[in-house]
Image (tube, rainbow, N blue to C red):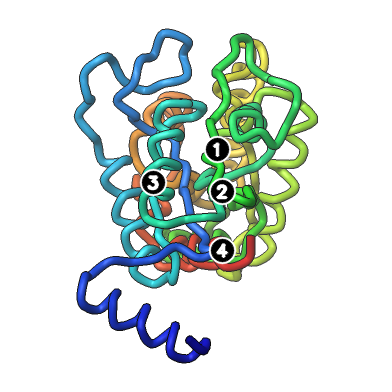
Amino acid sequence: MDMMKMILNIAILTFMTGSTMSFANSPGVLVLAHGVSGHSDEHGGGHGGHHPPREGTWEKTVRALVAEASIRGSFPVELAFGMWDRDSFQAGVDRLVARGATELRVVPLFISSYSMVIRAQHYLFGLREENPLWFDPGRISIPSVIAKVTFSPALNDSPELSEALGRRARELTENPALEELVLVAHGPVSDEDDELWLGDLRVHASRIGTGHLVHVITLRDDAPKEVRDEMTRRLREIVTGISSRGRTALVLPVLLAPGGIEAGLLERLKGLSYRYRGRMLAPDPSLVNWITRMTQEF
């Protein structure tokens, strides 16, 4: 039987049976997102109890983002919640393999790559030898059919994140000549990582294009208390300084979806004058564009 007849017969068989076949280099995309996973939290790595937790606004928003990216893309896409939840990540990998994936592309839907969370994820997927955590979360079992594993950067200094921030800034603004914008991100634990976070935030500040003077700061909620207190002092100093100049501080959280640090942010700003709408970055078409681009590039 020549090659053309073989291909024709396979096509006819597939059409008649409704079956699909897996070929080499069939990518599957696993999007990782901070959120509930439904697995045990005994090590502090999960986000639920022994019963499946009720999803909040964060999870629903992220699911909508990933669903839209899945429609646009040409590869199967699965979503796994948790910072370093091995069971949640493993289930996502297994679902992709069941859908015919022979290559795994991991996309972390996080603001920054520069954190212990992302380093832990690299460890789980066997892309890093050293475990950065205070316990061993275990490793993902990569099925033998997966020939290649790649791990994309987080949002970092991506133009898509700049676009989303610019959109939210324009929603906040009334008169740029009388306003100053404050970008507030969660931030990491270490000083070294924090410099990298701030560097990316400054890139976004330069791209926003609303005509505001832009300040950038991280809250570093997971750092020691003295570090958190210092970041609170600096934030209040920025906002107070803007008010003293007769301008309005526009406080814009660099957060993907509700359910994160926004309550603590408002507590830190208690008693100060500022404008804050409480809308996070998602849902936003730019974030869907970023997920789609990551699935193609890595």
- Tag of residue 79: 3
Picture quadrant of residue 87: top left
Q: Is residue 129 left or right of residue 73?
A: right
Towards the viewer: 294 or 263: 294
Other-residue count near label 4 (Cα within 10 Å), few / some / many at <14 / 14–19 / ≥20: few
Instruction: Identify the residue at the far front of this view.
Output: 1
Other-residue count near label 3 (Cα within 10 Å), few / some / many at <14 / 14–19 / ≥20: many
Asked which secondary structure carries label 4, the reply is loop
Determine contact: label 3, label 4, CB under 8 Å.
no
Identify which amino acid the numbered label 4 is placed on. Answer: Ala
Q: Which residue is mark 2?
A: 146
Identify which amino acid the numbered label 1 is placed on. Answer: Ile
Q: Is residue 284 left or right of residue 239?
A: left
Asked which secondary structure carries label 3, the reply is strand
Identify which amino acid the numbered label 3 is placed on. Answer: Leu
Residue drawn at (34%, 40%) of the image: 258
Q: Is residue 53 above or below residue 174?
A: above
- Tag of residue 150: none
Residue drawn at (37%, 29%) of the image: 263
Residue drawn at (53%, 55%) of the image: 102
First-in-chain label (2 vs 3) = 3
Could you tell me residue 193's position as x and y percent? Answer: 74, 33
Picture quadrant of residue 134: top right
First-in-chain label (1 vs 4) = 4
Q: Which residue is mark 4?
A: 24
